[in-house]
Image (tube, helix red, strand yellow):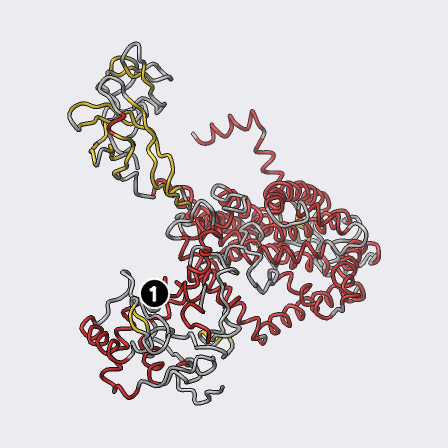
Amino acid sequence: MFSSISDWLDERTGYKALVAHALDEDIPGGARVVYVFGSGLAVLFTCQVVTGLMLMATYTPAVGSAWSSVFYVQHEVAGGWFVRGLHAYGAQAMVIVLGMHLLQVALYGAYKRPREVTWWFGLALLGVVQGLALTGYLLPWDQKGYWATKVATNIAGTVPLLGPSIQTLIVGGADYGQTTLTRFYVLHVGVLPATLVLLVTMHIALFRKHGATPPADADLTKKDKFFPAQLALDVMFAVVVLLVIAVITAWTRGAHLDAPSDPSIDYPPRPEWYFLFLFQLLKYLPGSLELVGTIILPGLAGLFLFALPFLDKGETTRISLRWQWLAPILLGGVGIVLLTVQSKRDDAHDEKFQHAAAEAHVRAERSIALARNGIPPGGPLEMLRNDPLTRGADLYAQHCTKCHVLRGKGEYDAPVHTGFASRAWILGMLHDPQDARYFGRTEIDDMKSMEKLGDEKLQAVTEWLFAQGQEPTDPPVNAALAAKGGEVFKESCMDCHLFKGEGADTFDGPDMTGYASREWLEKQISKPESIYGELNKMTAFAEDLSPHDITMLALFLRQERAATPETGPLPELAPQKTASK
Amino acid sequence: MELDTSKSRRGFLTLLTAAGSAVIGAILLVPGAAYILDPVLRSGGTKGRWIRVAELANLSKDHPVTAPVVGEQVDAWTKASAVRLGTVWLRVVGDDKVAAWNAECPHLGCKVGFDEAKKSFGCPCHDSAFTLDGDVQGGPAPRGMDSLETRVQDGHVEVKFIRFRAQIKEKIELG
């Protein structure tokens, strides 16, 4: 049955002869493990096409939704994280296997006459694969891709004379945006893969024309056919590579997705590891010599590889007789490895980088957590702008850390915000308002210690003050204790403090109505003098920040209410006896 | 590396090649199949919610009125709060009682219109026709127009908007 169908088909297509021709290739000197890299690359590229097409079924190349669609692949679509992981790590595997392929061909002298053109097609393929890698990681439009691409395209801009035009052409204008993304997308899924297929076709056709290059001491009487001996080795190699990729994907739960790209947020950009050596090289070159690292050295390396068949002209493929031509390649390889290792080591020892990377990680995690509840039509940046934890933290770092300390960051010039308006913070403040953690570093020196009230009453007032900022979604307060505290406040505090329009008989102290509630904090941030009067030194942010941003800051600060000495270390709340005025 | 090409060796290598190819295929196809089939594996439909669509005062007994249904929609990764989910036909059928039909034709989903002259609903695609009560009057529609639950609150009509599978006799919720 099967043979009659295949005969029918063969009569009409002649496919059997085609398959036989494909498999029936002579391997002079026999099948070898070192010949597996070319086929391995073909399998890897096929996998990239398959996984790439799948990703294309979800991905949208638009700045407002690219990140969202990749998030969707990574965290919502069944198996999406695995498909994306295979694609991302598969790309890195291609770079590695390509390096091994190049090294093998160089060591075996397989670029020599008459295989020069095969070699050149191989070099062109190296360029195309690098182009695919470079264009690929911009596509998620996350911080990593965005910043790394900015660096890469700026390097393209350093090319003498044509550089700026080339850069504008790639970027699609002066600014990074929609045209950049669309251009990279078309390069990545259309132009470069099509070019690669064309080049590979020529590369393989020429390879078949000239055959493999056996080592100098090979026994040429021994002959294998491509099928089955070499093909079995090739397939086994591909299996090993794919299993490694699959294991790494499973181990890391797929490729990382950074926070949505935002040019206004600090980010420590690093290229993918296989471009790190170039990145590192630029650190050692002063500005005037930058071209050496970006254009001249890579250009010379390319030129050397291109010219290699003409430089190493002898008949012999024996390595010992060609060391002067192989040495530059090996030295280059060692240089690349050393620079890559040094770059990783630099970063590992760079506290600033580690810190920035950790912050970027927090932002990425938060973005993903938010996106799980659905991304607004305005996109992921709108989502983050409306998140107090993200927007509030950004604004805090920008505007507040010049005077306040929160969780170890900032300047001690005003009350510490770690645990701000939590029970612990309030109680500590009542004990010693002039401590450096509270008002000790401000002009506000009217309030004296309330220790004379005794522990019981202090606890009650603390609970009452804490209850003032209570919002419906907050955890409950001890109502009985708070009520008692209210009495204490009326008796002992309202000479100076205002509450619901009453009090402040002898002194015009802060209004404690709704203390540390969202509205109270908004008022405190936008018009602090309305709370602290003329002793206030804090900047009024009503003009600098939009009402939305002030709300984000207020909500961000309100989180500190939940802090307790038990739930987390509050180092800034440890007594500081260095109150200075 | 020495490789024998005797028959058993050849058979073994062929088997190895086939097995290896199967492993490569499986690594791609198992997650790939899940990925492609995701929409089928995903549960959750329109889940009827009460949505306010019109004011009772604007409706009548003899002239059905069409109204857009605007509500929250989750479309892949996007969650939008005011999206047009579809259209309903509304007609008063008693005191504070309103009948509502999903305007999607139960035949193949085109948007059903109303013919004032004939006093009947009609589909512009394949000429299915429905009475004022939504029953099939002619054409290929397999069932009457899909009626929806309604209620009147503070003078406003609310419908529980649900979409149903087209082309079958039974009314089966989509999703």
Where residue A504 sits, quadrant-wise, is bottom left
**Residue at image location 29% in from the left, 34% down from the top:** B174
Q: Which residue lies most toward the top here?
A: B117
Q: Which residue is mark 1?
A: A517
Where residue B54 sits, quadrant-wise, is top left
Left or right: residue A22 versus residue A546 is right
x and y percentages locating residue A138 in the rendered image: 58, 52
Give the quadrant of the N terminus of chain A: top left
**Residue at image location 59% in from the left, 72% down from the top:** A347
What chain letter is assigned to the residue under label 1? A
Where residue B55 sits, quadrant-wise, is top left
Left or right: residue B147 versus residue B22 is left
- Residue flagged by tag 1: what amino acid is it? Ser
Query: Dot 1, crowdedness within 10 Å: few (<14), some or many (≥20)?
Result: many
x and y percentages locating residue A155 in the rendered image: 71, 57
x and y percentages locating residue A571 in the rendered image: 41, 81
**Residue at image location 24% in from the left, 21% down from the top:** B60
**Residue at image location 56% in from the left, 54% down from the top:** A233
Q: Is residue A298 above or below residue A120?
A: below
Left or right: residue A443 versus residue A373 is right
x and y percentages locating residue A389 in the rendered image: 42, 62
In the depicted view, which residue is nearer to us: A437 or B116? Answer: A437
- Secondary structure under tag 1 reads loop
Q: Which residue lies most toward the left here?
A: B95
Left or right: residue A70 versus residue B169 is right
